[in-house]
Image (cartoon, grey):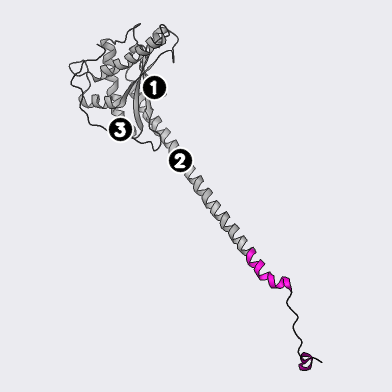
Amino acid sequence: MSLGAMSGKRRPPPPRRDEAERPFWISFSDLMTALMVLFLVAMTVALLSVTHEIAATEDRKTAREEEIDRFMDELQTVAARFPGVAVRGRVVDFGDRARFETNRHALDAEQARLLREVTPGLLALARAPLGEKWLKRIVVEGFADARGSYLYNLNLSLQRSERVLCVLLAAPPAPAALPEADRLLARELFLVSGSSFHALKESPEESRRIELRLEFFELDEARPAHREQPLDAEARCPLD
């Protein structure tokens, strides 16, 4: 008889292999579950952050478009004071009141006066909060009709655009000359462009025109540095 039997105590059975390993597998399973929960939480937070950022950007884009539309509505009110001048989209069209003769880039006295009378209202809007915030530049686009060679008409349309700048930057005693502050701002904002064989109208007369196309800053677009530079002492237009 064994000593255990004699003492009346039973020897405990040896531990089973799977019971010895069970605490490890339970801990590993809990760890994987916790990691999965953390991953899902992190992904949810990241998706919410991205969604919020996209929504905020879309809201800013919508606000930008609404403010630019308000600016254009105010410009339309300015243009309405001058019969024949219209605002279409983001373009100021002078219509029949600023037509060029064939192969000519000159504007007559009445056309020049009209340009000088319309521009101060536009520059006043450029100085207003919405203009300060969004208006990037004003592109003067001269157009030619389809007659003649491409390069000749391209040069002619550029000269027509340049003529507009000459009219706006003309100093007194030019009739209805802009004040110096307006001429400085016009020089800063206005840019010359030309177009040949593009955006033709139904007739050659309608095609020989000028338009002012307004361009606006994009969201977070860097603004060019402002340069303080006096007006040119020589007021004579190079085209003359």
Asked which secondary structure carries label 1, the reply is: strand
Q: Distance between the Cα atoms at labels 2 and 3? A: 25 Å
Identify the amino acid type marked 1: Val
Range drawn in magenta: 1-28
Check the image and report above or below for 7 versus 127.
Answer: below
Q: Residue at x 52, y 52 (%)?
A: 45
Figure quadrant of the C terminus: top left
Viewer-proximal residue, 24 or 237? Answer: 24
Q: Distance between the Cα atoms at labels 1 and 3? A: 19 Å
Identify the amino acid type marked 2: Thr
Q: Residue at x 62, y 60 (%)?
A: 32
Q: Is residue 81 magenta?
A: no
Residue mark closest to the camera, 1 vs 3: 1
- Kindly check if marks 1 and 3 are in contact, taking CB atoms under 8 A apart as contact: no
Question: Residue 30: where, in percent of width, then height?
Answer: 62, 64
Asked which secondary structure carries label 3, the reply is: loop
Residue mark closest to the camera, 2 vs 3: 2
The residue pinned by badge 2 equals 57
The residue pinned by badge 1 equals 91
Q: Is residue 17 magenta?
A: yes
Q: Circle 3: is it few (<14), some (14-19), or many (20+) Cα within 10 Å?
A: few
Magenta-drawn stretch, dominant element (helix, strand or loop):
helix
Viewer-proximal residue, 221 or 60? Answer: 221
Question: Residue 182: where, in percent of width, then height?
Answer: 24, 25
The residue pinned by badge 3 equals 128
Image quadrant where residue 234 sits: top left
Q: Circle 1: is it few (<14), some (14-19), or many (20+) Cα within 10 Å?
A: some
The number of numbered badges drawn on the structure is 3
Image quadrant where residue 224 sits: top left
